[in-house]
Amino acid sequence: MPVGYTFELRVGSVDAVATELRAPTLVGAEVAATCGFDLDEEVVDRWGELAQDVARRTTSGSTWLGEDEDATMYVLAVVTTMTHWYGSLAHSSSGGEAFREFLEGPADDALGGGLVHDLSGRELAGLLLDVLPSVGWAGNAELRAAVARGLPDDCGHLGPEDEDDLVQLIACVERAAAGGLDLFAVHD
């Protein structure tokens, strides 16, 4: 049976999220109640320890968290708590290759400037989550530059699913750019 995945688009401040990762202030139980997903009990129980571990890692340069499941879930919880949902694109495990082709093809062509690559996994406060689950982001200046380059008005040349996804992605980029917000993507 295929598993479902989302490429969740969220807005907020990269600086605020990075500051929280470097100098944690959030409380695990409060985050668990508000983060929008079922946060593992072990992560909640170890919240303070994980927060300090992640904060330490932010000072040691680019640190890949891909194999540290608890630290990864901690970062995802911080990002989702400190940002607001803007939209999401979905795919099944069996459709994963087609979704990657969509991101690397039509989505990248439409947004340009490496924006899709950055949304698919980009260093955040010295931390890198670029495999599922991944976190990426684009700053507001990058979003405004994409809008200034010109985003397509018509995506009808794509199949219906890709067209819907691209229209939603473009709308999120345009709204975040206009609102002075940074755009995050959490792919899980």
Image (cartoon, rainbow, N blue to C red):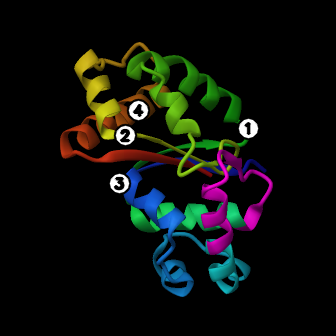
Tell me if residue 115 comes above or below residue 32 in the rendering.
above
Tell me if residue 127 comes above or below residue 50 in the rendering.
above
> x%, y% of residue 40?
69, 76
Neighbour class for label 1 at 10 Å: few (<14), some, many (≥20)? Answer: few
Query: CA gap, disc 1 to disc 4?
Result: 19 Å
Query: CA gap, disc 3 to disc 2?
Result: 8 Å
Query: Which mark sits nearer the N-terminus, 2 or 4?
Result: 2
Look at discs 4 and 3 and give the one toward the viewer.
3
Residues at discs 4 and 3 in contact (Cβ within 8 Å): no
Q: Which residue is mark 2?
A: 139
Query: Which mark sits nearer the N-terminus, 4 or 3?
Result: 3
Tell me if residue 174 comes above or below residue 90 in the rendering.
above
Q: What's the amino acid at mark 1?
A: Ser
Query: CA gap, disc 1 to disc 2?
Result: 31 Å
Q: Which residue is mark 4?
A: 164
> x%, y% of residue 127?
62, 50
Rendered residue at 54%/86% (across/down): 29
Look at discs 2 and 4 and give the one toward the viewer.
2
Say if the magenta span includes residue 66.
yes
Q: Which residue is mark 3?
A: 13
Q: Is residue 181 left or right of residue 113?
A: left
Residues at discs 2 and 4 in contact (Cβ within 8 Å): no
> x%, y% of residue 49?
69, 79
